[in-house]
């Protein structure tokens, strides 16, 4: 276990997100630090295992009391709040970007942000200053700088957050207003004035069409009731009598047909009887000349009159006299035929009358139907057309009215949005002005501090003898070192320039703060392995340590400097409290050093 | 009117027989004098079929379509057209179609009175031909108003059936009046 692991453990104990080495996770249960912060002296103990590591046990060493547990996650009370309030820094400040287009109210400033100004890790010493490599972190880094040096105050930070938030709301409101206006333009909606006028017009149309419909309803109703009903009644009667006439006609036709058929039968019978009589009369006169039984000729046979020529017996019937039976039947049939003829004639006459009645009724039904049709066509149909037209106009006007109401709603919305945006704009201007005034009041202090910082920094850089540097100052805007009018990140990293500049920078901030005594800048600095990147440049290394020692001397016990390094220059050995760790004396006495070959570094660099 | 019912019956019987004999005589005479029949009525089957067409004149043109052009000679009444089976002298359905059981005594009487004679028919059958007395009586009867229509029908049927044998006529009747013939033997065709 090396120096970096030890320093990261301190960071962990203070509630930060530290890089914990494997050996720590397996061999350490919890870490405790005894710190003096503000007027407090606290013992903070935080477990290593991830399950419990969000809880920090706090003991007030001054009062010798265990305080309630504090948390590193979102639970309250938070360890960050405790440490900030101990330093005299409010814990509800937000670091909003001061850029004129920023719309974010900024993230809350925590103790971890301030700790970046107290701890320069081995990974950062050759790379960045308090997270300066991350542009997204810049607003917070700067806010913390300003806060620590009194270049800002909680009310200014709050104003900055409010301005940014308001700016966002203002832009949203303006955008929403523009969207609604664009929608209205795209949908061809008239201006507010036109929409109002058209809506009134549509309402008038609705009233007019409704009145027209009412009038038509009243006009049509009586016409149907009074006159058509009478015609319909008459038609009903006429249709009934037409059906009766049709029945009578068909009955008479059937009767006539029946009588005619009967008459035909009688005539047939009469004709047959007459044929029988005439045939009988003729054939009776023709004697048999051949026997119909044996077929022998009878020509030679003489037979006295009144005897049968075949059997020579008396003929029971007088020859050539029509029988009484035939005469009687014939006369009876002829009487019957006459009677039937009379019936048929009578029925024929009746049929003529019935057909006449039928034709009359048919005509009446036809006339009545036509009259009803004429009435409905001539009187109601035009009215119905007008009714249909009025209904269509009403529906159209109602549709237009609904559409315009919708458009007017959008205009209302647009007006609301516009006035909301205007209100936000006014408030934004007011706050911006207030912010400008507040910032202006701090302008003098700002000038003094930066003059001091510049002087101190230039002196430190010169004293350390950073290679190739002719001029050095602190940037007024991003608060980072400027060498030869070049930003540090653009300056050549050769020869330990970055490490030396960083040490000069931190010593500068510390010295100015200690000298002025009116800043919140913590009197604590933890630097991990400043020599690592100096490439065994002993001269530079010596100058660097000389500057650190000078700073510590000047502070007269008001500052704590912790430097972790592999080898201190010989001149400073034992001048100050020193702890040596080697294979025989591991950083944690209970965890033996595994040997050089088995060392696992926590940041990819040698420990 | 006589008081003797037997005499009345006998008189009616004799007149009815005379009536049928006269009609058959007219038919035999008409057929024998019409071309296409070889001057005779060949066979009782043919006699029965031609007599059927004469007694059911409303059906005659169905069996022999050429009769349709001789409607006047058929003397059809309205009821004969509307109800062609409702006739004064219905026949029965027997072997080979329409038949009348009185044909044998009728022919016997006609031959006994020397009005019709037997002649040799085709394929050994018996054919009938009128005697000179029969022809004379037939022509006399044709002048009577009661028989004029019957004689006209006989001539029309004879003309329309020229060249047809009795069997051919039977086939035509079976085919064209199938429903009418589709009944039990001895049932009246009405």
Image (cartoon, helix red, strand yellow):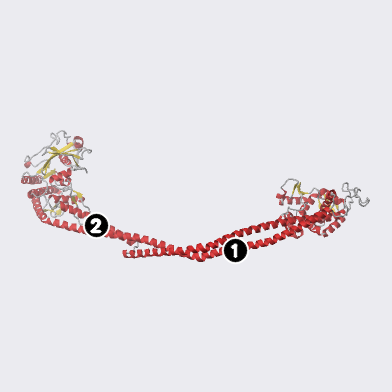
Q: Position of residue B42 (x, y in %)?
A: 81, 51
User: According to the image, label 1 marks what residue?
Assistant: A364
Image quadrant in which the N terminus of chain A is located = top left
Label 1: few (<14), some (14–19) or many (≥20) C-alpha neighbours in 10 Å: some
Chain containing the residue with disc 2: A
Image quadrant in which the C terminus of chain A is located = top left
Q: Position of residue A234 (x, y in %)?
A: 57, 62
The answer to whether A161 appears left or right of A290 in the picture is: left
User: According to the image, label 2 marks what residue?
Assistant: A170
| Residues tagged by mark 1 and mark 2 found on one chain of the structure | yes
Identity of the residue drawn at 65% across and 63% down: A356
Q: Which SS class for mark 2?
A: helix
**Vertically, is A364 above or below A506?**
below
**Vertically, is A550 above or below A431?**
above
Q: Looking at the image, can residue B160 be seen? A: no
Whole-angstrom CA distance, mark 1 to mark 2, is: 86 Å
Q: Position of residue A188 (x, y in %)?
A: 35, 63
The answer to whether B38 appears left or right of B61 in the picture is: right
Q: Looking at the image, can residue A560 be seen? A: yes
Q: Position of residue A226 (x, y in %)?
A: 51, 63
Which one is in front, A428 or A266?
A266
Identity of the residue drawn at 46% across and 63% down: A218
Which one is in front, B31 or B112?
B112
The answer to whether B111 appears left or right of A353 in the picture is: right
Which one is in front, A212 or A268?
A212
Label 2: few (<14), some (14–19) or many (≥20) C-alpha neighbours in 10 Å: many
| Quadrant hosting residue A44 | top left
Which one is in front, A419 or A134?
A419
């Amino acid at each position: 276990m090396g120096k970096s692991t030890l320093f990261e453990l301190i960071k962990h104990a203070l509630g930060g997100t530290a890089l914990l080495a494997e050996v720590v996770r397996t061999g350490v249960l919890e870490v405790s630090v005894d710190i003096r912060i503000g007027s407090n002296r606290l013992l903070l103990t935080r477990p290593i295992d991830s399950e419990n590591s969000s809880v920090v046990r706090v003991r007030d060493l001054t009062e010798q009391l265990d305080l309630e547990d504090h948390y590193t996650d979102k639970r309250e009370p938070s360890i960050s709040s405790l440490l900030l309030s101990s330093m005299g820094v409010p814990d509800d400040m937000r670091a909003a970007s001061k850029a004129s287009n920023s719309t974010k109210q900024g993230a809350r400033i925590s103790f971890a942000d301030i700790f970046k100004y107290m701890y320069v890790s081995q990974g950062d010493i050759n790379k960045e200053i308090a997270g300066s490599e991350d542009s997204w972190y810049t607003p917070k880094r700067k806010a913390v700088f300003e806060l620590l040096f009194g270049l800002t105050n909680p009310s200014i930070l709050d104003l900055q957050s409010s301005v940014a938030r308001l700016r966002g709301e203002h832009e949203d409101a303006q955008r929403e207003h523009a969207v609604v206006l664009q929608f209205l333009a795209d949908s061809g909606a008239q201006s507010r004035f036109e929409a109002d006028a058209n809506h009134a017009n549509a309402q008038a149309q609705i009233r007019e069409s409704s009145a027209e419909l009412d009038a038509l309803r009243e006009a049509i109703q009586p016409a149907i009731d009074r006159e058509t009903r009478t015609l319909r009644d008459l038609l009903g009667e006429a249709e009934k009598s037409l059906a009766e006439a049709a029945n009578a006609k068909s009955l008479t036709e059937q009767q006539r047909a029946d009588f005619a058929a009967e008459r035909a039968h009688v005539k047939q019978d009469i004709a047959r009887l007459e044929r029988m009589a005439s045939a009988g009369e003729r054939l009776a006169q023709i004697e048999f000349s051949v026997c119909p039984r044996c077929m022998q000729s009878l020509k030679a046979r003489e037979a006295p009159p009144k005897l049968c020529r075949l059997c020579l017996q008396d003929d029971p019937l007088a020859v050539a006299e029509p029988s009484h039976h035939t005469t009687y039947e014939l006369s009876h049939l002829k009487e019957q035929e006459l009677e039937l003829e009379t019936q048929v004639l009578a029925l024929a006459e009746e049929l003529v009358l019935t057909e006449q009645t039928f034709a009359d009724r048919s005509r009446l039904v036809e006339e009545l139907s036509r009259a009803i049709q004429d009435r409905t066509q001539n009187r109601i149909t035009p009215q119905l057309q007008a009714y249909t037209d009025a209904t269509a106009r009403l529906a159209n006007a109602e549709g237009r009215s609904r559409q315009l109401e919708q458009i007017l709603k959008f205009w209302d919305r647009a007006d609301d949005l516009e006035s909301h945006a205007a209100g936000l704009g006014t408030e934004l201007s007011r706050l911006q002005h207030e912010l400008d005034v507040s910032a202006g009041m701090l302008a003098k202090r700002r000038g003094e501090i930066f003059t001091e910082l510049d002087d101190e920094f230039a002196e430190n850089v010169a004293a350390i003898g950073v290679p190739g540097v002719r001029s050095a100052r602190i940037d007024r805007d991003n608060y980072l070192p400027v060498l030869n009018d070049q930003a540090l990140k653009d300056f050549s990293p050769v020869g330990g320039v970055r490490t030396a500049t960083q040490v000069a920078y931190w010593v500068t901030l510390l010295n100015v703060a200690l000298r002025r005594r009116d800043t919140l800048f913590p009197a604590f600095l933890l630097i991990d392995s400043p020599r690592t990147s100096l490439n065994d440049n002993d001269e530079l290394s010596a100058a660097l340590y000389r500057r650190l020692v000078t700073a510590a001397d000047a502070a007269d016990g008001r500052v704590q400097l912790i430097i972790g390094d592999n080898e201190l220059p010989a001149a400073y050995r034992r001048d100050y409290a020193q702890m040596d760790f080697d294979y025989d004396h591991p950083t944690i006495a209970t965890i033996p050093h595994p040997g050089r070959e088995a060392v696992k570094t926590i940041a990819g660099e040698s420990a | 009117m006589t008081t003797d019912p037997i005499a009345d019956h006998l008189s009616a019987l004799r007149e009815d027989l005379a009536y049928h004999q006269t009609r058959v005589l007219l038919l035999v005479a008409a057929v024998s004098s019409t071309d296409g029949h070889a001057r005779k009525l060949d066979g009782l089957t043919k006699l029965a079929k031609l007599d059927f067409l004469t007694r059911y004149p409303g059906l005659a043109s169905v069996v022999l379509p050429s009769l349709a052009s001789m409607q006047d000679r058929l003397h059809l009444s309205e009821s004969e057209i509307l109800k062609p089976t409702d006739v004064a002298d219905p026949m029965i359905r027997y072997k080979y179609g329409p038949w009348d059981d009185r044909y044998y005594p009728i022919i016997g009487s006609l031959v006994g009175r020397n009005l019709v004679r037997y002649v040799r028919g085709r394929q050994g059958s018996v054919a009938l031909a009128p005697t000179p007395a029969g022809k004379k009586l037939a022509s006399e009867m044709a002048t009577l108003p009661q028989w004029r229509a019957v004689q006209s029908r006989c001539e029309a049927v004879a003309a329309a059936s020229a060249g047809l044998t009795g069997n051919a006529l039977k086939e035509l009747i079976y085919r064209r009046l199938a429903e009418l013939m589709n009944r039990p033997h001895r049932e009246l065709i009405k």
